[in-house]
Image: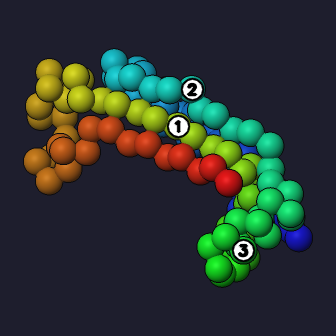
Amino acid sequence: MTSTFNFELFKKRLDLFLEKIEDLGGETDPLTIEKPATEEEIKAVETKLGYTLPPHFREVLLENTAHLEFLWYLYHFLEENKDFLPDEICGIFAGKLKLLL
């Protein structure tokens, strides 16, 4: 399989995002990226779920990682800088991405 997903660019963008959060005085957890999944691991998950994972998602799991985590938290910064974000999105002060196969 040839990946159409640029995982290196994705990692770089996540790192830049986390760096910016820290520059603003926010808190982050380190970006965690572990080894890709095996075909057997994916098949076991598909059996447990009862359906086949989408091809592009399988591709990312097989060629890039089966475990990715990152967390950011900007609440204290936004409390001190209330006009930093528009009212419509000011409640978005934290985020977490966790992919575990």
| Residue 54 visible in the current orientation | no
Q: Residue at x 23, y 23 (%)?
A: 77
- Give the image location of residue 41, x and y in percent: 80, 59
Numbered badge on residue 99: none
Q: Is residue 30 above or below residue 6?
A: above
| Mark 1 residue element | strand
Question: Which comes before the other along the chain, label 2 or label 1?
Answer: 2
Q: Amino acid at mark 1?
A: Phe
Left or right placement of residue 25 versus residue 35 in this view = left
Numbered badge on residue 70: 1
Q: Is residue 12 above or below residue 26?
A: below
**Circle 2 sits on which residue?**
30
Marks 1, 3: nearer the viewer: 3
Disc 2: CA contacts within 10 A as few (<14), some (14-19) or many (>=20): few
> In whole angstroms, how far apart are the C-alphas of marks 2 and 3?
32 Å
Identify which residue, 47 or 65, lies in the foreground. Answer: 47
Q: Mark 2 and mark 1 in contact? Answer it, CB < 8 Å.
A: yes
Residue 2, quarter of picture: bottom right
Q: Amino acid at mark 3?
A: Thr
- Give the image location of residue 3, x and y in percent: 80, 65
Question: Which comes before the other along the chain, label 2 or label 3?
Answer: 2
Disc 1: CA contacts within 10 A as few (<14), some (14-19) or many (>=20): some
> In whole angstroms, how far apart are the C-alphas of marks 2 and 1?
6 Å
Q: Residue at x 73, y 60 (%)?
A: 60
Residue 56, quarter of picture: bottom right
Numbered badge on residue 47: 3
| Residue 8 visible in the current orientation | yes
- Give the image location of residue 38, x and y in percent: 86, 57
Q: Quadrant of the C terminus?
A: bottom right
Q: Quadrant of the N terminus?
A: bottom right
Q: Is residue 77 above or below residue 6?
A: above
